Image (tube, grey):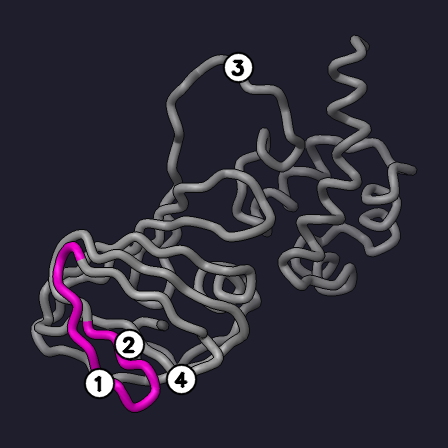
Amino acid sequence: MDLETEDVLDAVGPRLRALRRERGITLADLAATTGVSESTLSRLEGGQRRATLELLLPLARTYDVPLDELVGAPRTGDPRIHLKPIRRFGMVFVPLSRRPGGTQAFKMLIPARPKPLEPTLQTHEGFEWLYVLNGRLRLVLGERDLTLSAGEAAEFDTSLPHWLGSADGGAVELLILFGLQGIRAHVRPGGPHPPPDDGPPG
C-alpha cells in the first residue's frame, strides 16, 4: 500500500469523529442508525479499526455525504462539483459547500403553492444569512413580517422565533448560509422536527 493511501486511511478515524461531533450525534445513536456496533464505531474513530467499504457506506448514507468526502480522498482532477439535492419539509436544499465543519452554504428552493402557508415559527441556536435570487420571500422574525424581493438579503439570530416561506404562493429561490445549529435544524437527520406540512422551516 502506498504512503498516500496510508495517510488517507489513517485520517479517516479523526475525520469521522469530528463529523459525528459536529452533527451532535452520539455513538449510540449512530450505531442504532447504521446497524454498526457502538464498539466497532468507537474503534474506527480511534484508529484501532481499519476503515472498510462495509463500514463506510452506512456512515456515508447517514451523514448524507459522498464517500470520497467522508474519507477525505485526494481529488482526481475533475473540476466538476456533483451536487446532491436534499429534500426536507417539502423544500429542496442544494449544498454548495463540500467540507464538514463551520458555516455551510446551500441553494434553497421553496416550491410554488396555490395557497400561501401560515407561518409556524421556530427557534434554534445559531444564525442564518440569506439572499433572494428569484421570487418573493416572506420572512417572519419575531413580531416583524417582512417581504424580500430578488436581490435583497437578510441576516438574523435564529434564537428569535422565525419562519421562511413564499410571500405570494410563487416559487422562491435563495442562497442561504447556516451555522452548525441551523444545519441540524433544517437539512440534517435528527434535527428538530417542525409540525408536518405546516410550512417550510426558517
The answer to which of 53 and 109 lies nearer the viewer is 109
Q: Residue 75: x and y, percent?
A: 55, 19
In this view, the mark in front (4 or 1): 4
Residue at 54% x, 74% y: name it. 125
**Mark 2, residue position:** 199
Q: Can you identify the residue that label 4 sits on?
A: 161
**Magenta residues?**
138-151
Question: How many C-alpha atoms fall within 10 Å of the one at disc 3: few (<14), some, or many (≥20)?
Answer: few
Q: Residue at x 46, y 67 (%)?
A: 127
**Residue under the image location 63 percent in, 39 percent down:** 57
Between the C-alphas of marks 2 and 4, the distance is 14 Å
| Residue 118, numbered label | 1
Q: Amino acid at mark 4?
A: Pro
- Residue type beneath disc 1: Glu
**Residue lying at the far right of the rendered structure:** 48
Q: Nearer the viewer, mark 3 or mark 4?
A: 4
| Image location (x, y in percent) of residue 169 | 10, 71
Tell me the quarter of the picture where residue 31 sits: bottom right
Q: Earlier in the sequence, mark 3 or mark 4?
A: 3
- Alpha carbon separation for disc pair 2 and 3: 41 Å
Circles 2, 1 touching at the beta carbon (< 8 Å): yes
Along the line of sight, the residue nearer the viewer: 191 or 139: 139
Numbered mark located on residue 76 in the image? 3
- The kind of residue on which mark 2 rests is Gly
Kindly report the distance in space between the C-alpha atoms of the residues bearing marks 1 and 3. Answer: 47 Å
Considering the whole magenta stretch, tell me its main secondary structure.
strand
**Crowd tier of the residue under label 1, counting other residues whose Cα lies within 10 Å: few below 14, some 14–19, many 20 or above:** few
Is 201 drawn above or below residue 12 in the view shown?
below
Residue 96 vs 31, above or below: the answer is above
Q: Locate residue 160 relative to residue 117 in the image: left or right.
A: right
Rendered-image quadrant of the C terminus: bottom left
Find numbered disc 4 in the image and state the secondary structure of the residue it sits on.
loop
